Image: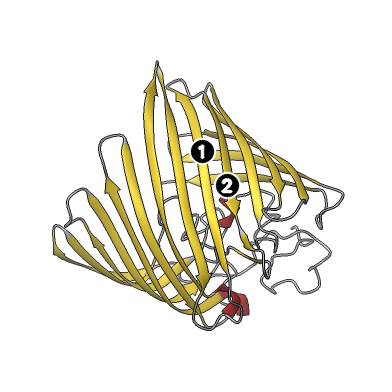
C-alpha cells in the first residue's frame, strides 16, 4: 500500500512539505441524498445533497477525478420555461469537499448563490451569462462575487469543425473577505476536430490579479484538476496571477483515445515564468462495462519560480453499469 504522499487538506500533517499533494485521503462520505419535485415540465426543484456541475466546471464542479466527489447541500431550481434557455439557480449552505468529513478542510460552511443561464442561439452557438456569490464562513479569503459570460460555438470546416470559446469574468471581494480587490478572468480557445478522432487546439487562459495588493482571481468551487495542468501545481492561484497558454492534440488509434497537452505558465502581472508542463493520457474500453486509463503529468519548473520539477502517474480502472 502506498503511504508516502500528502493527501492535502490537513489530512497528512507529517507529509506536507515533504511530498507532492495527491488529494485522495482515506475515508468515506455520503455522496448524494436529495428530493426532486417537478412543478411542471419546465420547472424542477431539488433539495438535499447533490451535484452542481456548471458549464465546464471551471467555477463550480464536482472534482469527479478524485476518489471522493465534491457535492453540495443546496436548494436548486432548474428551469427551461424561458425559450431556448436552461436556467439553474442553487442556494448552497454546505460544500462537501474531496477531503471527507474526517478533515476540517472537508466541509465549507457557506451562504452561496449560484446563477447560470445557458441561452441557445442556434444549433451551433450558445451564450451563458452567470453570477456566483460565495460567502465562505470557513475561509474568508475565498468569499467572492463573480459575474461573467461564456460564448461557445462551432464552425464547420471541410470534413471537420472548429470549436470556439470566448469567456470573460470579473471578480471582487464579498462579505467577510478581509481584503478589497478586483481581478479578471479570460479564456479564449479553439479546437479543430475530425470525425476520425483527430483534434488540434490552442487556448489562452488567464486568472488575473489586483496589482495594488496582488490578490488573485479565485475559484474555490472548481474542478481544479481539469485546468492548468494535471500535475496540480496551481490549485491555489499565485499572487501574481497566472497566464496559461496550452496546445492540445487528440488522436484515436484503434480502440485507444490518446491526448497530449503542452502548457506554458507565466505570471499575469510581473515578468515571471513559472514553468512548462506536458500531460499525456491513453484510455480505452476493455469491455462494454469496464475501462482503463493511463495518465501522466510532467511539470518542469523555471529557475526563478517557487515550484519544483514534478512528475505524476496514474492508472485508473472504471466500471459502469
Front-most of residues 285 and 309? 309
**Horizontal and vertical percent for residue 61?**
47, 59
Query: Secondary structure beneath disc 1?
Result: strand
Badge number at residue 189: 1
Q: Which mark is residue 165?
A: none
CA gap, disc 1 to disc 2?
8 Å
The image's colouring method is secondary structure
The percent position of residue 19, horizontal first and vertical second, equals 80, 61
Can residue 176 be seen here? The reply is yes
The single residue placed furthest to the left in the displayed view is 40
> Hey, which residue is sitting farthest right in the picture?
303
The residue located at (61%, 34%) in the rendering is: 247
The quadrant in which the N terminus is found is bottom right
Do the residues bearing badges 1 and 2 touch, measured as CB atoms within 8 Å?
A: yes
Q: Nearer the viewer, residue 236 or 243?
A: 243
From the image, tell me which residue sits under label 2. Answer: 205
- Where does the image place residue 3, in percent across and percent down from the top left? 76, 62
Q: Residues within 10 Å of mark 1 (few under 14, many from 20)?
A: some
Q: Position of residue 181 (x, y in %)?
A: 58, 71
Q: Name the residue at 44% across, 36% down.
A: 164
Q: Quadrant of residue 261?
A: top right
Residue 139 visible, this angle: no
For residue 176, above or below residue 185: below
Amino acid at each position: 500500500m502506498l503511504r508516502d504522499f500528502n493527501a492535502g487538506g490537513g489530512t497528512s500533517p507529517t507529509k506536507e512539505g515533504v511530498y507532492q499533494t495527491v488529494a485522495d485521503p482515506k475515508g468515506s462520505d455520503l455522496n448524494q441524498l436529495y428530493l426532486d419535485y417537478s412543478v411542471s415540465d419546465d420547472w424542477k426543484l431539488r433539495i438535499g445533497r447533490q451535484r452542481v456541475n456548471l458549464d465546464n466546471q471551471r467555477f463550480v464542479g464536482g472534482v469527479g477525478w478524485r476518489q471522493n466527489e465534491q457535492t453540495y447541500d443546496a436548494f436548486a431550481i432548474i428551469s427551461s420555461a424561458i425559450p431556448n434557455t436552461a436556467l439553474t439557480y442553487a442556494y448552497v449552505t454546505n460544500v462537501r469537499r474531496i477531503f471527507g468529513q474526517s478533515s476540517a478542510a472537508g466541509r465549507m460552511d457557506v451562504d452561496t448563490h449560484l446563477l447560470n443561464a445557458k441561452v441557445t442561439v442556434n444549433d451551433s452557438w450558445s451564450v451563458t451569462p452567470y453570477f456566483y456569490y460565495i460567502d465562505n464562513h470557513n475561509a474568508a479569503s475565498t468569499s467572492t462575487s463573480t459575474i461573467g459570460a461564456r460564448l461557445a460555438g462551432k464552425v464547420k470546416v471541410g470534413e471537420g469543425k472548429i470549436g470556439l470559446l470566448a469567456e470573460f469574468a470579473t471578480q471582487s471581494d464579498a462579505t467577510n473577505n478581509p481584503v478589497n480587490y478586483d481581478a479578471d478572468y479570460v479564456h479564449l480557445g479553439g479546437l479543430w476536430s475530425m470525425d476520425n478522432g483527430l483534434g488540434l487546439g490552442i487556448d489562452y487562459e488567464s486568472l488575473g490579479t489586483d496589482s495594488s495588493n496582488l490578490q488573485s482571481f479565485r475559484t474555490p468551487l472548481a474542478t481544479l484538476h481539469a485546468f492548468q495542468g494535471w500535475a496540480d501545481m496551481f490549485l491555489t492561484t499565485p499572487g501574481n496571477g497566472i497566464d496559461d497558454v496550452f496546445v492540445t492534440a487528440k488522436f484515436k488509434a484503434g480502440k485507444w483515445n490518446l491526448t497530449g497537452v503542452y502548457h506554458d505558465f507565466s505570471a499575469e502581472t510581473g515578468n515571471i515564468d513559472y514553468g512548462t508542463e506536458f500531460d499525456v493520457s491513453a484510455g480505452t474500453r476493455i469491455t462494454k462495462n469496464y475501462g482503463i486509463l493511463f495518465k501522466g503529468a510532467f511539470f518542469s519548473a523555471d529557475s526563478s519560480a517557487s515550484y519544483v520539477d514534478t512528475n505524476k502517474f496514474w492508472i485508473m480502472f472504471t466500471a459502469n453499469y
